[in-house]
Amino acid sequence: MKGNGGILGPLNSPTTNSAPGVWSLRESIRHILANNWPSVSTGSYNAQYLIVAAGAAGGGHYRAGGGGAGDLDEGTLLINSGQTYTFTIGVGGQPVAGDSGTAGNDSSLDAITVPGGGPGGKYGVDGGPGGNGGGGGGLSGGAGVGGLGNPGNDGGDGSNGSAQCGGGGAGAGSPGFNGGSGPDDGNGGDGVTSTIITPAIASAHNVGEVIGSDVWFCGGGSAGSYDAGNDTTPGKGGGGKGPKASYANGGDAMPNTGGGGGGSSGATAGLGGVGSDGVGLLRIPTANYTGVITGSPIVVTEGLDTILIFKTSGTYTG
């Protein structure tokens, strides 16, 4: 056997990623001591995860409620070598012409499931329940009640006075505001921030809503209003805006935030805003990253970590 690992002749010097040929014991020891031996990921290691469920659509028709945001969960996961971990990413709720919106779909990481947001109610109809509840529709006489959040926050109630403003959809960080004519009435509830992804990466890959030095997820959609109603503001974390105008549709939630859509302001066949799809993140020490993935997640390296961004369902194998 020739030196440098070759059976029939010399080969290229080994690298940190490959070691060609058959090695003698002396050669093996020499390259191990020189830290020039290929590393193999074994055993278990910790990775950070973020799971964001999809937001619901805002209500249609008149003075409709904002859609509730999806819920979220983040923490640390023990990754075992050879085990496969599956992200299922929920799709955002869709508006229905002249009617309440539809709920956002759940997202999950294996057995960890977070629920989608509750839909915004149309004119005078209650908001729907969800991970965070949708806002109720406003009505002169008998307004809709905000949807209940489980495990998150409740949507705001629609107003039943002359203001005729719907209730705001709840965010993961705060409830939706009740409708009316005050400064916060009909606003969407704020979401929450995450430290797993930095603003630079979030902006580059359209994930979350970047506000200053923070990345927000799961903001509630604001309500549609009319006449003396409030010009509403969506929740931080991608919520869609409900307009204050005659016969205007609700604004869509920001993509890949889990935000709820805005409510329609006034039209029999008005449409609420579309709820945002969910997203999944996995932050892995690069020294342990295997590269075995499915579903085409975005792969980003930052410092000593590799970040997988799942906008659609997929897997990672440790």
Image (cartoon, helix red, strand yellow):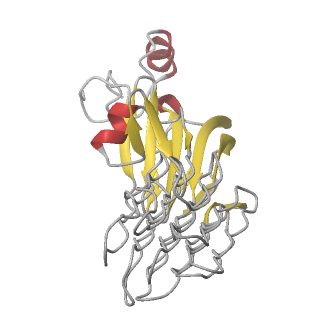
User: How many numbered dots are placed on residues in this image?
Assistant: 0
The picture places residue 179, in percent across and down from the top left corner, at 57, 62
Position above or below: 91 against 77? below
Q: Is residue 47 visible?
A: yes
The picture places residue 226, in percent across and down from the top left corner, at 41, 69
Q: Residue at x 41, y 64 (%)?
A: 242
Looking at the picture, tell me which residue is in the foreground, 61 or 300: 61
Q: Residue at x 38, y 78 (%)?
A: 266
- What is the residue that sits farthest to the front in this orientation? 162
Position above or below: 202 against 28? below
Q: Is residue 19 visible?
A: no
Quarter-of-image position of residue 98: bottom left
Looking at the picture, tell me which residue is in the foreground, 83 or 151: 151
Which quadrant is home to the N terminus? top left
Position above or below: 277 against 63? above
Looking at the picture, tell me which residue is in the foreground, 170 or 304: 170
Quarter-of-image position of residue 45: top right
The picture places residue 127, in percent across and down from the top left corner, at 63, 74
The picture places residue 300, in percent across and down from the top left corner, at 36, 39
Looking at the picture, tell me which residue is in the foreground, 233 or 300: 233
Q: Is residue 235 left or right of residue 158?
A: left
